[in-house]
């Protein structure tokens, strides 16, 4: 979808649909009043008879308004003139997108940057326009023999001339975010026979080829063997697809500033291995690489936006399948750290690939490390599809991520990482087991990872409940890219 910035009188804007606000109490916004004057009170009459009262999200599409250049006008309730909550603003932008999409329009123009949103700045308001309209119009049709190419394709933002420069700067950031989100969704939605570990590596290499700020390196199984990544490779043994360890570095600063390292779980299909999952909904296990897709999406967004910060993405990628050579419950493997692991459940494979990737991440001398993984069904039970699970060994890092989640609406909830949970991972034959029993499954999974992250500040995001929907909504959501990107950009702004 294309986004642009315009300025000038509302009545003179040529567009398929001009979106203007109506405040609570049936009061036209300044832009709507400009149209109303040209239309000799036509909009006032609609409002006065109660067709639109100004309630947030209330919408009325007016097909023809005399005296103006726009083909249609969308009157949209925007609540109180003195300001509305962020959630209300997101609701009304969503309603605007639905209205234009429902009317099968190809383009539109919004004047809703004029609405005051409590506690939010101009960049946030622009971002909501771009993110919400892009999400409403996103389609994954690569494997459809016939696809409808028609739909909303362009949105212009009408602003005062004095605001044009600031809005364009905010729009550039929002476009970069959409670029990253679309890549994330495309990768996660792609079927597992097409999105293999090798395909993820190819996409990372293609990103680096397109952007001078990115550098890609891919380790093969022999390289991982030489590094002692016995835990990661134990998961790959049941697959005919070779595992890959993908590194993508974004260099936004010329100095030696320590990078943020993002580690994304890249299990491109998870059958559970020998501990086979039940058949119903197993098709959704193509989404088990959404952590990896999130990392690649963030790196694509950073390359577009160009913030002054250094970020490294690390993606351990493999399939988890049953085979005569696959890992078995009771097997003991040695991780890159030298710690040994008793595999009690081969369906707890995400932590087995992440632990070696987390050990590998130390070589980048990170400022912080954040791993992103569709790790535990227990997180879905605990938090549903509303909040991402967050666990961390550092309070400052955890609070910053929580704040980014609140700003973007991509919220997380922090769970404890107390030492008392560690005993659930005790093993009689190895340094640890890879599962800690039914109780506190999300926490013990993070406790396992914590044993490999003692040398740096680290946070774990369990996105098992937030990464995708089910049934008719079996698509990637794009989370947690908004949270991660906001956190990184906020760090860059403070640097």
Image (cartoon, rainbow, N blue to C red):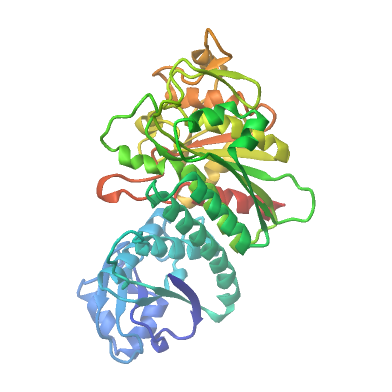
The quadrant in which the N terminus is found is bottom left
Residue 447 seen from this side = yes
Residue 155 position, x and y percent, is 42, 74
Please give the name of the residue rendered at 41% of the width and 75% of the height, measured from the top-left corner: 154
Compared to residue 214, the image places residue 152 above or below, namely: below
Farthest bottom residue?
67
* In this view, 384 is above or below 474: above
Instruction: Check the image and report above or below for 182 versus 374.
Output: below
Q: Position of residue 185 (x, y in %)?
A: 42, 54
Would you say residue 26 is visible in this rendering? no
List x then y, in percent, for residue 172: 56, 67
In the depicted view, which residue is nearer to us: 201 or 460? 201
- Residue furthest top as drawn: 428
Residue under the point 61% across and 64% down: 210
Compared to residue 313, the image places residue 55 above or below, namely: below
**Residue at 67% of width from left, 55% of height from top?**
493
The reply, left or right, for residue 95 in relation to residue 435 is left
Q: Judge left or right: residue 482 versus residue 62.
A: right
Residue 161 quadrant = bottom right
Q: Nearer the viewer, residue 151 or 239?
A: 239
């Amino acid at each position: 979808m294309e986004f642009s910035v315009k300025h000038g009188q509302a009545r003179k804007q040529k567009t398929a649909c001009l979106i203007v606000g109506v405040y609570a109490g049936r009061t036209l916004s300044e832009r709507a009043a400009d149209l109303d004057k040209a239309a000799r009170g036509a909009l006032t009459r609609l409002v006065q008879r109660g067709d639109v009262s100004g309630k947030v999200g209330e919408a009325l599409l007016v097909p023809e308004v005399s005296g103006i250049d726009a083909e249609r006008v969308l009157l949209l309730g925007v609540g109180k003139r003195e300001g509305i909550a962020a959630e209300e603003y997101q609701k009304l932008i969503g309603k605007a997108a639905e209205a234009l999409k429902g009317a099968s329009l190809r383009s539109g123009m919004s004047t809703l940057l004029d609405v005051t949103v409590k506690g939010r700045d101009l960049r946030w308001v622009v971002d909501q326009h771009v993110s919400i309209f892009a999400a409403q119009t996103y389609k994954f049709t690569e494997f459809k023999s016939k696809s409808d190419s028609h739909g909303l394709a362009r949105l212009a933002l009408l602003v005062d001339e004095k605001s044009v420069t600031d809005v364009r700067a905010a729009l550039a950031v929002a476009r970069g975010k959409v670029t990253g989100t679309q890549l994330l969704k495309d990768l996660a939605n792609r079927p597992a026979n097409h999105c293999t570990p090798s395909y993820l590596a190819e996409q990372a290499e293609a990103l680096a080829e397109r952007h001078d700020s990115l550098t890609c390196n891919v380790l093969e199984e022999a390289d991982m063997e030489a590094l002692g990544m016995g835990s990661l490779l134990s998961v790959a043994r049941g697959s005919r697809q070779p595992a890959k360890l993908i590194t993508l570095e974004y260099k936004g600063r010329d100095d030696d500033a320590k990078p943020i390292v993002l580690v994304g779980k890249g299990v491109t299909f998870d059958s559970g291995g020998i501990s086979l999952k039940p058949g119903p909904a197993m098709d959704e296990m193509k989404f088990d690489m959404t952590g990896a897709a999130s990392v690649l999406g963030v790196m694509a967004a950073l390359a577009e936006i160009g913030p002054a910060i250094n970020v490294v993405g690390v993606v351990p990628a493999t399939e988890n399948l049953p085979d005569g050579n696959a890992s078995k419950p009771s097997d003991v493997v040695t991780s890159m750290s030298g710690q040994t692991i008793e595999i009690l459940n081969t369906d707890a494979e995400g932590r087995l690939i992440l632990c070696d990737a987390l050990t590998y991440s130390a070589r980048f001398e990170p400022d912080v490390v954040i791993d992103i993984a569709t790790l535990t069904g227990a997180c879905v039970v605990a938090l549903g599809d509303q909040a991402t699970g967050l666990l961390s060994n550092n309070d400052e890092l955890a609070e910053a991520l929580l704040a980014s989640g609140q700003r973007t609406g991509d919220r997380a909830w922090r769970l404890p990482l107390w030492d008392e949970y560690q005993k659930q991972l005790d093993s009689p034959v190895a340094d640890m087991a890879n599962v800690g029993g039914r109780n506190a499954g999300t926490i013990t999974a993070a406790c396992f990872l914590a044993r490999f992250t003692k040398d740096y500040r680290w946070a774990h995001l369990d996105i098992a409940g937030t990464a995708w929907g089910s049934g008719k909504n079996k698509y990637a959501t794009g989370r947690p890219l908004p949270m991660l990107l906001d956190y990184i950009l906020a760090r860059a702004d403070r640097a």
